[in-house]
Image (cartoon, rainbow, N blue to C red):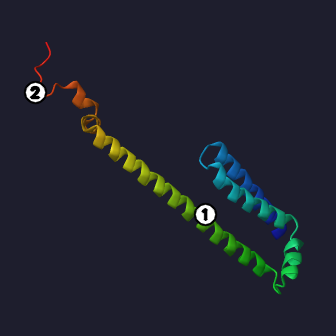
Amino acid sequence: MTHQMTSMVIGLALAATILWLVRRDHLHGPYAFWWIGAAATVTLLGTFPHLFDVAARYLGIGYPPILAVLLGFALLLIKILTMDLERSRQERHIRRLAQRIAMMEARHPDTAQEEELGPESQSQPRQDEPPAG
């Protein structure tokens, strides 16, 4: 099996795995686009390896395989940046939710205390109440 066929098989297997993960709801849509793009690129370049040579010549790169390294590094940097942006957005959202909960608990302290104690505290009579019966 040639390296061209190996690249095609790896790309198709990656695409099938991503689609399976999305279908099983283990990977959400926006994240899947990155991986489908990577699988499509590997499949495309495995099918037509001369595209790397043409692109490298067009960009003025003397050694075409280094183009793969440069593109991979650039895509990793972009992916890391988008992950950090998403994580920052989620942290901001969590902080705002915690602030909203704190404000609601401040407005209704008796309700918040009952929720903290859980359902077992509601079945037992409080000490200042006479037992039922």
Q: Is residue 45 above or below residue 35?
A: below
Tell me which residue sits at (77%, 78%) in the image: 67
Residue 4, visible in the rendered structure: yes
Q: Nearer the viewer, residue 109 or 82?
A: 109
Residue 1, visible in the rendered structure: no
- The residue identified by callout 2 is 128
Q: Nearer the viewer, residue 74 or 43?
A: 74
For this view, does 121 lie left or right of residue 103?
A: left
Q: Hey, what amino acid is under mark 1?
A: Thr
Task: Label 1: state its secondary structure.
Answer: helix
User: Which comes before the other along the chain, label 1 or label 2?
Assistant: 1
| Quadrant assignment, res 80 | bottom right
Q: Pointer 1: residues within 10 angstroms few (<14), some, or many (20+)? A: few
Q: CA distance from mark 1 to mark 2?
A: 56 Å
- The residue identified by callout 1 is 82
Q: Is residue 70 above or below residue 106?
A: below
Q: Residue furthest front?
A: 107
- How many badges with numbers are in the image? 2
Q: Quadrant of the C terminus?
A: top left
Report x, y in % for residue 125: 16, 25
